[in-house]
């Protein structure tokens, strides 16, 4: 692509960043919706969403990284647009977490948005520190921690 073509389409570099972020949200939400389609149990839906998110994050397409890390460089209305994109992506997860709470997998007094942020933070951390596990294995581990905890007593009960 010629530089002039890029500058014609995006008058400011912030416009290009927002376009990349929009692409990331579309691609990620599409992957998650596809992964949860046809799954009826909430635990299957949430694990499938986690797996799809990780697979998108690890795919080698850096658009999601731009959404996660480069929004901080934006100012004013561009930053607000980036926040709306985050909200659009996060609302998918909020729905799944509220559904899990409604099904009794998550205690009623848990602050779902904070839980979602912590959970996504754990998934996003793997972008810079790739684990030696598959996306499905990570999703299963996070589901177990979410629903059963990571306390020693759980390990002792399994033995």
Image (spheres, rainbow, N blue to C red):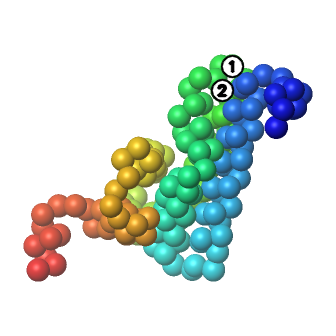
Mark pair 2, 1: CA separation: 5 Å
> According to the image, label 2 marks what residue?
79
25 displayed left or right of 152:
right
State the count of labels. Answer: 2
**Residue 16 drawn at (x, y percent):** 74, 32
Locate residue 92: give its quadrant.
bottom right
Residue at point 52% right, 61% down? 55
Q: Disc 1 on helix, strand or loop?
A: helix
Q: Which mark is residue 1?
A: none
**Residue 34 drawn at (x, y percent):** 65, 70
* Dot 2 and dot 1 residues touching (CB under 8 Å): yes
Residue at point 75% right, 38% down? 19
Residue 33 in view, yes or no: yes
**Residue 78 drawn at (x, y percent):** 71, 26
User: In the picture shown, does residue 126 fall above or below 85?
Assistant: below
Given residues 40 and 69, the one toward you in this image is 69
Residue 100 in view, yes or no: no
150 displayed left or right of 72:
left
Residue at point 64% right, 23% down? 74
The residue carrying pointer 1 sits among few (fewer than 14), some (14 to 19) or many (20 or more) residues within 10 Å by Cα, namely few
**Residue 64 drawn at (x, y percent):** 59, 46
Residue at point 64% right, 75% down? 37
Q: Disc 2 on helix, strand or loop?
A: helix
142 displayed left or right of 124:
left
User: In the picture shown, does residue 132 fall above or below 12?
Assistant: below
> According to the image, label 1 marks what residue?
76
Tell me the quarter of the image containing the N terminus: top right
Given residues 63 and 67, the one toward you in this image is 63
């Amino acid at each position: 692509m010629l530089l002039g073509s890029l500058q014609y389409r995006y008058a400011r570099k912030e416009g290009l960043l927002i376009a990349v972020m929009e692409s990331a949200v579309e691609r990620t939400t599409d992957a998650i919706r596809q992964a949860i389609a046809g799954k009826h149990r909430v635990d299957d839906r949430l694990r499938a969403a986690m797996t799809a998110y990780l697979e998108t994050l690890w795919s080698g397409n850096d658009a999601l990284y731009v959404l996660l890390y480069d929004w901080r460089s934006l100012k004013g209305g561009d930053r607000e647009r980036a926040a709306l994109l985050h909200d659009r992506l996060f609302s998918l997860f909020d729905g799944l977490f509220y559904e899990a709470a409604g099904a009794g997998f998550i205690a009623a007094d848990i602050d779902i948005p904070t839980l979602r942020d912590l959970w996504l933070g754990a998934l996003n951390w793997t972008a810079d520190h790739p684990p030696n596990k598959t996306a499905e294995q990570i999703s299963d581990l996070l589901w177990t921690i979410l629903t059963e905890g990571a306390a020693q007593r759980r390990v002792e009960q399994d033995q």
